[in-house]
Image: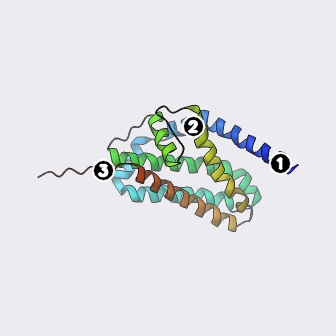
Amino acid sequence: MKLIKFKKIGADIKMQAQKLAHEGFKQIFDRIDQLNIKKGVDRIGLDKFIEQCAYLAAGSGIISGSGGALTVIVGIPFDFLNLITQQFRVTMAISYYNKGSYQLSYEEFMSVVATSLKVEAGVNLTKTVMEAIAEKMLMVLGTRTAERMVPVVGAVIGGTANYVFIKRMAKSVKEMQNRPVIISVN
């Protein structure tokens, strides 16, 4: 009986990952204003921009875990959407900081995301790679859901987990990107 439930959960995660990969990531990407990310990095610097995104992610984690089971049910989709958005914003900011160009194509961007999540990505971004990204992100979120059922404790866990996730993702993307080239002018 328990084996069947685990198989069903695995199938549900796979199905949700496929939906997210085929529709969700592109919609989130298209709604992010890349010029505003450039302006934010130029205004406050890369590290403060990353910190700001981590706090925004922590905020939705706190909200989704603050009231126990009811807010988890209602808050998890919002929290997941915000977590992906903040991860995308951080990835775009680091890419802009290192390359000097703030405009990324969706395919180019998803290759960076795949690499930062340690998902194998070939030359072409395939549906399978995008599904692997979505599945990995859903698994990360799913492992924290049960812990958020307890009010107040859930808020602390949700906020902390989101904050740490964004900071770790930023570190991973920074490590894989080339360092900026500094040209001195005499």
Residue extending furthest right? 1
Q: Is residue 1 left or right of residue 127?
A: right
Q: Position of residue 64 (x, y in %)?
A: 67, 57
Callout 3: helix, strand or loop?
loop
* N-terminal-most mark, 3 or 2: 2
Figure quadrant of residue 155? bottom right
User: Quick check: marks 1 and 2 in contact, CB under 8 Å?
Assistant: no
- Going from N to C along the chain, the mark reached first, 1 or 2, is 1
Query: x, y (%) of residue 25?
Result: 56, 38
Q: Residue at x 76, y 58 (%)?
A: 69
Q: Earlier in the sequence, mark 3 or mark 1?
A: 1
- Which numbered marker is on residue 180? 3
Q: Which residue is mark 1?
A: 3
How many marks the image carries: the answer is: 3
Q: CA distance from mark 3 to mark 1?
A: 50 Å
Task: Answer few, some or many: residues within 10 Å of disc 1's Cα (few below 14, many 20 plus, some between 14 and 19).
Answer: few
Q: Which callout, 3 or 1, points to the residue nearer the camera?
A: 1
* Residue plotted at (68% across, 56% down): 143
- Residue at 64% x, 49% y is 78
Quadrant of residue 128 within the rendered picture: top right
* Vertical relation: 145 (above or below) 34: below
